[in-house]
Image (cartoon, rainbow, N blue to C red):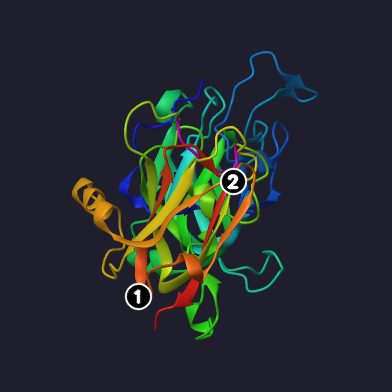
Amino acid sequence: MNDKPSALPDFTKGTINLASARLGAKAVDATDEFFAPLERMLKDEEAVFIEDKYDDNGKWMDGWESRRKRTPGHDWAIISLAKPGRIFGFDIDTSHFTGNYPPGASIEGTFIDGDDGPDDNTQWTQILSQKDLGPGIGAAAHHFFEVDDRATRKQVFTHLRLHIYPDGGIARLRVYGTPKFDWSKVGVDEEIDLAYLFHGGRPLAWSDAHFGEPERLLSPGRGVNMGDGWETARRRGPGHDWTIIKLGHAGIISGLTVDTAHFKGNFPETCELCGAYLPEHTGAFSEEEISASQDWQTIMPKQKLQADNIHEFGPEHIGHNKPVTHVRFKIHPDGGVSRLRIKGKVAR
């Protein structure tokens, strides 16, 4: 059984996993994939261990695993990030790799403009110097490392090269960062999704995420199943569920799309949206700030929702025409929403 860490480090707050396969990260190359392919390392689900599962090369492992190295050198792998982005830290997860984990790892990055991948002439920048790793037992399998260099944190990368010393297996590589989006290219009168994950929108706080985290609300495309959305536990007391979202850019909201795809017996009865203009607030919310958000200005009052349906709410549903930087999306009383699109114009 894989144990999640009880709390994530501060550097992960307000970031997304740029190495998420669900978001589009891809395995590019590896020196060796004898026991397990590189693409497994990018899976979003927690790594699992299946006691009696073997394949032609040996024990089946949920991650990337190279064979035992019998020559000088070490193994490495290259991945393409889901989107170009700035990187603040990593989780090098060795879950279930107990006698076959690498004792050390380091990470380099590069920016490639276009569809071509790295080649022998690619210039790499060190992002993470060689760090010690331990066995994949419980929560200690999650090896969190922050990018300390301020200049490196400001750089944008498209590809990473993970070095392991000398060989072994990594269950998951999570790359905590923010995607780069050029807001200067958005027209004055252009309507855009202000909360889209790849536009820099991100959830900062939420009441509950028992069955699915609110980041999925802002993800690309439609949800593929009921697990691909934000879903809370069944509420047995008073109140309602909510999530606070930081928009990618301050904007004036003109409409919402609320998609309850696949949520049929567990969709919320109603939803509503409130907002605030907090241009200096870029980080996580304190308990006091979360409490204060209950009094934010109403942008869209309560609207009825239906099962497995795309709900379009236009300007006629919006009762607020001033810029906001953060919104509080409320669902009553609980349930699941697959996708949320917050449409509007950029506040100049």
Residue flagged by tag 2: what amino acid is it? Thr
Residue flagged by tag 1: what amino acid is it? Lys
Classify 10 Å Cα crowding around label 2: few (below 14), some (14-19), many (20 and above).
many
Reading the image, the residue beneath label 2 is 260
Name the spot of residue 293 as percent of width and height, x first.
27, 54
Reading the image, the residue beneath label 1 is 322
Q: Which residue occupies the extreme bottom position in the image?
A: 188
Q: Quadrant of residue 134?
A: top left
Residue drawn at x 39%, y 83% as measured from the top left: 348
Left or right: residue 339 versus residue 278 is right
Can residue 229 be seen in this snapshot?
Answer: yes
Name the spot of residue 273 as percent of width and height, x first.
40, 57
Local SS, label 1: loop
The numbered mark, 1 or 2, whose residue comes first in the sequence reads 2
Q: How far apart are marks 1 and 2 (CA)?
A: 28 Å
Local SS, label 2: loop
Instruction: Relative to 40, say whether 84 is above or below.
Output: below
Q: In which quarter of the image is residue 240?
A: top left
Can residue 152 be seen in this snapshot?
Answer: no
Tell me if residue 228 is in the magenta stretch.
yes
Tell me if residue 234 is in the magenta stretch.
no
Q: In which quarter of the image is residue 238?
A: top left
Residue numbers of the magenta segment: 227-233
Name the spot of residue 228 as percent of width and height, x first.
60, 42
Left or right: residue 318 versus residue 237 is right
Classify 10 Å Cα crowding around label 1: few (below 14), some (14-19), many (20 and above).
some
Judged by its main secondary structure, the magenta piece is loop
Q: Pick the residue in front: 315 or 84.
A: 315
